[in-house]
């Protein structure tokens, strides 16, 4: 029973630390590594390592190390998730290649937004938190529109156009939106390693993917990139 108690305690701690600061995440990592040391053959080590790795999106090397440790314990599903996570990490700091036809009929190429900070918001009607997050993101976009230095793009993982239309009408979202009706099997988000919603990316003025997790402190992160020299 001891591993179960320790695991439940750890998952509860992680649940209450949705946006941990540096001290909190180091404490979580310490607990995860202690569980790994105490119960080295427990398959749940993989889940714990992956979970704590997500807190290190601003430290790609640390996150990569934790994910590679997790592979040792992973089943097929978790290995697929880790593969997605590592794919995203490889993109950080590099020019992002992104082209699509929007539901509004536009041909979108992210290279055309050089000189602007681009926020890419991944969402779906089946993920209420990602739909709720559209409102604040739209407010940020509306507030920065007059600067001419910001662009919002949205990627829908819905599989029904009616659902997307309802969301767009309710939120008033008017930025370019990608949708192909294939949901989680959609080629575009799969190529980008998207495996959780909401996901918020930031691309800098040079076209480089800079932030993989801008859910919290979104506007501050955007303005920080906007202040950077082009």
Image: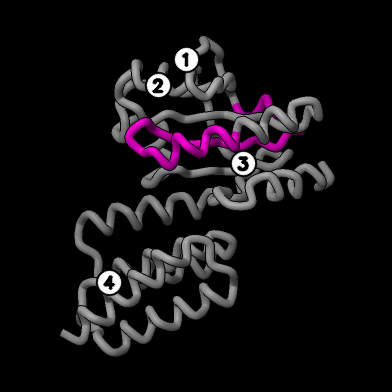
Residue where numbered disc 3 is placed: 95
Colour convention of the picture: one colour
* SS at mark 4 in the image: helix
- The answer to whether residue 183 is left or right of residue 100 is left
Would you place residue 208 above or below residue 22 in this image? Answer: above
Q: Residue at image x 40%, y 21%?
A: 164
Q: Residue at image x 39%, y 64%?
A: 15
- Magenta stretch in the rendered image: 110-137
Of pointers 4 and 1, the one earlier in the residue sequence: 4
* SS at mark 3 in the image: loop
- The answer to whether residue 225 is left or right of residue 3 is right
Q: Tell me how far mark 2 sits from mark 4, CA to CA.
A: 39 Å
CB contact under 8 Å: marks 1 and 2: yes
Q: Tell me how far mark 3 sits from mark 2, CA to CA.
A: 29 Å
Residue where numbered disc 1 is placed: 103
For the C terminus, give its image quadrant: top right
Residue 225 screen position, x and y as percent: 74, 46
Residue where numbered disc 2 is placed: 164
Q: Residues within 10 Å of mark 4 (few under 14, many from 20)?
A: few
Q: Tell me how far mark 4 sits from mark 1, CA to CA.
A: 42 Å
For the N terminus, give its image quadrant: bottom left
Q: Does residue 87 belong to the magenta stretch? A: no
Residue 97 screen position, x and y as percent: 55, 34
């Amino acid at each position: 029973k001891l591993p179960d108690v320790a695991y439940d305690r750890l998952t509860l701690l992680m649940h209450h630390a949705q946006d941990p600061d540096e001290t909190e995440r180091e404490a979580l990592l310490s607990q995860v590594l202690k569980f790994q040391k105490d119960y080295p053959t427990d398959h749940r080590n993989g889940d714990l390592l992956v979970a704590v790795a997500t807190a290190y999106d601003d430290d790609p090397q640390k996150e990569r190390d934790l994910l590679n440790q997790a592979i040792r314990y992973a089943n097929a599903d978790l290995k697929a998730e880790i593969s997605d996570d590592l794919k995203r990490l490889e993109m950080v700091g590099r020019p992002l290649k992104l082209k699509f036809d929007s539901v509004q009929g536009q041909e979108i190429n992210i290279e055309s937004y050089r000189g602007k900070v681009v926020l890419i918001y991944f969402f779906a009607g089946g993920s209420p938190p990602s739909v709720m997050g559209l409102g604040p993101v739209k407010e940020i976009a509306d507030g920065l529109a007059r600067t001419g230095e910001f662009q919002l793009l949205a990627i829908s993982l819905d599989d029904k156009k009616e659902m997307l239309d309802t969301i767009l009408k309710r939120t008033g979202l008017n930025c370019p939106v990608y949708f192909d009706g294939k949901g989680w099997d959609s080629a575009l988000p799969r190529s980008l390693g998207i495996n959780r919603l909401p996901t918020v990316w930031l691309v800098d003025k040079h076209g480089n993917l800079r932030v993989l997790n801008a859910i919290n402190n979104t506007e501050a992160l955007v303005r920080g990139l906007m202040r950077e020299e082009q």
